[in-house]
């Protein structure tokens, strides 16, 4: 798949997720085989106002490339001017968020709200495309709600406005993240445009990734929540798409090593105070699905230093061993 001058082959991409897909998580996902990553959404207005917090979200390390920074806003001029700030961090791609369903974003005429104003969305895309020295992509949804599904028209508009590729989440804004994602709309959009299309929604296994590619014809699968606490999913997808190999989930010891590595990176990049507060949800995702893990989830919600995370990892390994022993005795 080609996004302007950026070549992507095999595997799957990491979707942008605010408050989740930070630099540490992106690096971890890349290490397991994600072919492309998109950073957390950044306010164009915040960048122009000199917000240090906004600029921090744009930082990209060498281990997560190729990747995109994602901008959001509702003013074409502001977004175009924000490109200059974003380019200080040398992203390979500029992505425009036109799909975020969060009330604080969509309620302020940005994100998914732009699907209700295609003319404004077109002016934004054209303005950013004119200002950007790198390819420009647009991520959007099926529509605002089921009574206003307009992904097909929106995709054509994005292409005509200069987008180099699009990413489509097969849900409406009203649907938020409730199942199921509509893959048929992804198929229709792919058939209607000539630029690359990335499909997003309900890809949580290698088999699902292959089904999406085959049923929609999309050029690349984009994985979001399916990778939370499971960054090795990208390697599993790559292997399955390559030759049908089904890689097992890693044993608990390896999972906990990955969790510790991610949290250590978060602390290095953000400082302990922010990192360990944000790490609590990630730790919870790493132990999701374990039988009898309720106490561990409570423990994950209280971690405040790396030693706490190590103790959580040790407890998870012990529980996994107990569960395995119990299964052997039952057999």
Image (cartoon, rainbow, N blue to C red):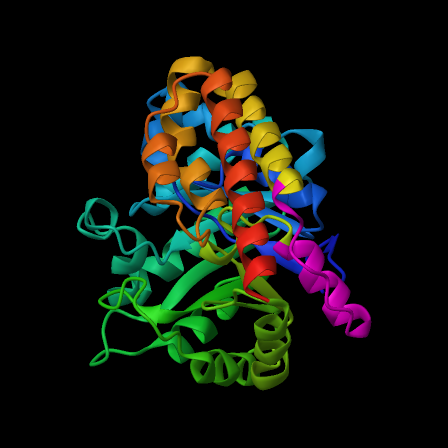
Visible residue check, residue 69? yes
Residue at 20% x, 44% y is 104
In the image, residue 285 above or below residue 87: below
As for residue 240 lying within the magenta part, the answer is yes
| Residue in the foreground of this view, choosing between 180 and 247 | 247
- On the picture, is 45 further left or further right than 266? left
Residue at 64% x, 60% y is 12
Visible residue check, residue 133? no
* Position of residue 103 measured from the top left corner of the image (x, y, whole percent): 19, 50
In the image, residue 135 above or below residue 282: below
**What residue span does the magenta drawing correspond to?**
233-252
* Position of residue 71 measured from the top left corner of the image (x, y, whole percent): 43, 42
Quarter placement of the N terminus: bottom right
* Position of residue 184 measured from the top left corner of the image (x, y, whole percent): 45, 85
Name the main secondary structure of what is drawn in magenta.
helix
Residue positioned most to the front: 329
- On the picture, is 312 further left or further right than 32? left
């Amino acid at each position: 798949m080609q996004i302007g001058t950026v070549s992507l082959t095999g595997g799957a991409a990491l979707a942008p997720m605010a408050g989740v897909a930070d630099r540490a998580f992106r690096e971890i996902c890349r290490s397991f085989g994600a072919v492309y990553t998109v950073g957390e959404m950044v306010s164009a207005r915040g960048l122009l106002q000199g917000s240090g917090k906004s600029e921090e979200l744009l930082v990209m390390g060498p281990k997560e490339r190729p990747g995109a920074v994602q901008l959001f806003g509702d003013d074409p001029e502001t977004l175009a001017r924000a490109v200059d700030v974003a380019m200080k961090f040398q992203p390979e791609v500029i992505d425009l968020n036109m799909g975020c369903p969060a009330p604080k974003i969509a309620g302020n005429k940005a994100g998914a709200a732009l699907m209700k104003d295609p003319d404004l969305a077109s002016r934004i895309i054209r303005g950013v495309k004119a200002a950007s020295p790198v390819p420009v992509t647009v991520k959007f949804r099926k529509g605002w709600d089921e009574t206003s599904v307009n992904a097909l028209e929106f995709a054509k508009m994005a292409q005509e406005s200069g987008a180099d590729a699009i990413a489509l989440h097969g849900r409406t804004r009203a649907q938020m993240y409730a199942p199921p994602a509509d893959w048929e709309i992804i198929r229709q959009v792919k058939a209607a445009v000539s630029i690359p299309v990335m499909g997003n929604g309900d890809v949580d296994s290698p088999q699902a990734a292959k089904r999406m590619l085959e049923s929609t014809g999309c050029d690349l699968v984009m994985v979001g929540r399916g990778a939370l606490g499971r960054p090795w999913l990208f390697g599993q997808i790559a292997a399955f798409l390559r030759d049908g190999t089904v890689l097992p989930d890693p044993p608990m010891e390896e999972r906990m090593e990955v969790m510790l590595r991610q949290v250590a990176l978060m602390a290095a990049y953000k400082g302990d105070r922010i990192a360990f507060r944000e790490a609590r949800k990630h730790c919870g995702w790493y132990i999701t699905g374990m039988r009898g893990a309720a106490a561990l989830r409570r423990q994950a919600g209280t971690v405040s230093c790396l030693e706490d995370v190590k103790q959580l990892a040790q407890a998870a390994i012990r529980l996994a061993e107990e569960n395995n022993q119990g299964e052997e005795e039952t057999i």
